[in-house]
Image: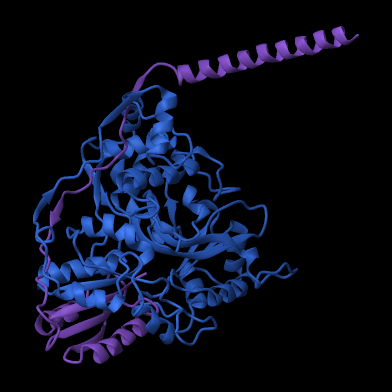
Amino acid sequence: MKWRISMIVLAVLCLNSLLSCSRLDNRTQTQGNAGGEEITVLSPKGQPPPIQLKPMAPRLDTLDGKTVYLVNDGYLGTDILLGEMQAWFKANVPELTTVYKRKGGGGFTAEDPELWAEIKEKADAVVMGMGH
Amino acid sequence: MAAVVGHCVNIESELGVPTVPLITSEFYEQVKTHHTVQKGMPGLRVTYLIPPVWGKTAEQIREDIVGNSPPTGKMVMREIVENLTKPLTAEEKKTGTIEQSSGPASFTDTPDNLQQMFMEDRMTDYMPIILPTEEKVAEMLKGTSHDPDEVVGRMAAHTAMPGDNNVEVFEHWSYTVKTVAINAVMAGARPEYLPVILAVASTGKEAISVSDNSFTEGLIINGPIRDEIGLNYGIGALGPFSQANSTIGRAWNLLSINAGNCGRIGTTYMGVIGNPMNWNNVIMAENEESSPWKPFHVRKGFNPNDSVVTLCEGWGILSAKNSRYSVWAREMDFSGTLKKIVADQDMLFGAMAVLSPPVANYIKEEGFDTVEELVQFLSPPVEGQGNAPQAKMPFRRRPQINIVVTGGANNNYWSYGGMAVRQSVLIDDWR
C-alpha cells in the first residue's frame, strides 16, 4: 500500500514538473519573440531650444549702506514672510535699508515694468518670494 | 516657483541687480536641475525655505527664517546675506550657448520592446499606443494639405492667457506637422481627425498644465467637422463613445508630453492630487442641431459652416446633481438652479454649464431667447458682493460664464464646472 501511495505521489510530482517546464518554455518563448520582427518607428519628440547662458549680476561687497528691495510676487503668506525678514534685517544689519514692494501685473508670471524701472534706479539688490 | 526664477533671472541679466529668489525646499530638484538651467542661469542663488510658508503664523515664520535651509543646512537669513555678498565664481560667470537634443529621430526594435521603451521613456500616457511607423505616419499625413516639415507651434508646460504680458517660465519646444501626425498615430486617431489636432497644436497650449492645482483642459468642437469625423454629441457626449471623442484629446496629451515636454512629475508636472480628466481632457462636440440657441462658435464670431475648436481650461466638469441646489422636483427651475450654482462657485475660471438639449430648451422656454440673456441673468454681482467667499488670488480675471449644449435628449440632466475659454481656432485652416 505504502509503495502504491509513493508511486502515485511520485507520478504527480513528475507530471507537475513537466507542466511547469512546459509553462516556463512558453514564457521563455514569448519573451524571446518579444513581439516578432524588428520594426522602425519615428520619435514623437519635439525640438527643445538652445539655452543661452545669461550673466549673473555682480554681488555686493557689503550690505551696509545699501538698499534691498523685498518683492512679494503675490503668493499667499509672502507678505508675512517678507515682513519677518525685514524685521530680521533691521535687527541684524542695521545699516541696510529694506523696501517692501508688492509686484503688480495681475499674476505670478505677470511683468511689472514700473517696478522693474524702480529697481533699476533705486535697488542695490532684490529678495523675491515666494516660489511655493 | 518658476515665475520667481524667471523674474530674478531677468532682474540679474537685464537690470544688473543681484537677487535671491525664495522658494520652498520641496522644489529644490525642480529649480536646480530644470528652471535655472532652462532660464540660462544655472548658478542663480536661490535660498530654499522650510515648507510650507502659506498657513503659518508670523511667529512660526520668524522661527523658520533663523532655522536652517533644508538643502544647505545654513541659517536662512545668513544664507540670503551670503548669496548677496559672496563674489561670483568662475562657473557662475560662464556665458555661451548650450545646444539641446531630444534624442534620435527613430527607434528600431521588436514591437513589444518598443511599446515597453516608449512607456519607460515617458513617451506615452502609460497606455498602449499604436506604434508610429513611417507608413502609418504617411497615412496620417494624408489628413492635411500642410507640408510635414512646417512648424506648427511652440509649447511649454505653462502658457499665459493670450494677451497677457508675462515672463516666460518654461522653455518652449517646437514641433512640425509631422511631429503632430506621429503623436496622432500613437493616440489611435484617424487621418481625418488630424486637422482638429493640428488646430489645437497651433495654439501652443499644453494639455497637461504644470500647476499644482491639477487643472484639466477642454475642447469645444463646432461646425461640419463634427459629423465628418463622427464626433459623438448625443447620448454620452462627454464620455468615451466614439473613436474621434476618445483619441483627439489623447493625441493632444501625447503631443504635450513629447513635443512640449509636459507632464513630467517633479519638473513639468506638480498637480497635488492629479485630475482624472487629464486622461483625455474634456472633449465636447456641441449638439448644435438640438440647441435652441446659436452654436458656441457662431457666438464667438465664426460662420455656422466654419469648423472651429475652442480651448478651455480649469477645474473640470461634473454633474449638476453634485450641487446641493440641484433637486428633483415636479416643476424644475433650471435657470434659477443654475444661477444659484454659479453664485456658489469660485469664479477663478468662471463658470461653464454643459446643458443637455432638453434642459437648454426648458431654459429658453423660461424666457431666455439668447445665451447672452441667460449669461446676463447668471452673472454674479461685482466682486465682494456675491454669496460665495472668493479667494484672494492675484490673477483673478473678469469672470466668464460659458454655455455649451450637448448630449442626449433622454433626460433632464446637465453638468457644470469652472472652465475658462482661452481661444477659438479655425479647423478649416488645417485641412
Q: Colour of chain B?
A: blue
Image quarter hosting the N terminus of chain A: top right
- Which chain did the image draw in purple? A
Residue at (38, 37) in percent of width and height: B184
Nearer to the camera, B318 or B290? B318
User: Closer to the camera, A95 or B103?
Assistant: A95
Q: Examine the rendered structure and indicate whether residue B86 appears above or below residue A83.
A: above
Image quadrant in which you'd find residue B188: top left
Instruction: Look at the image and tell me in which quarter the C terminus of chain A lies.
Output: bottom left
Foreground of the two, B192 or B156: B156
Name which residue lies at 44% across and 63% down: B314
Residue at image x 24%, y 75%? B80
**B283 left or right of A127 in image:** right
Kindly give the residue lying farthest to the front in the view shown: A2
Residue B300, can we see it?
A: no
Q: How many marks?
A: 0
Q: Is residue B102 shown above or below A107?
A: above
Q: Position of residue B29 (x, y in %)?
A: 33, 57
Which quarter of the picture shows residue B412? bottom right
Q: Position of residue A79 (x, y in %)?
A: 34, 84
Q: Is residue B107 above or below residue B276?
A: above
Of residue A26 and residue B4, the one placed in the foreground of this image is A26
Residue B93 higher or lower than A16, as above or below: below
Q: Is residue B307 visible?
A: yes
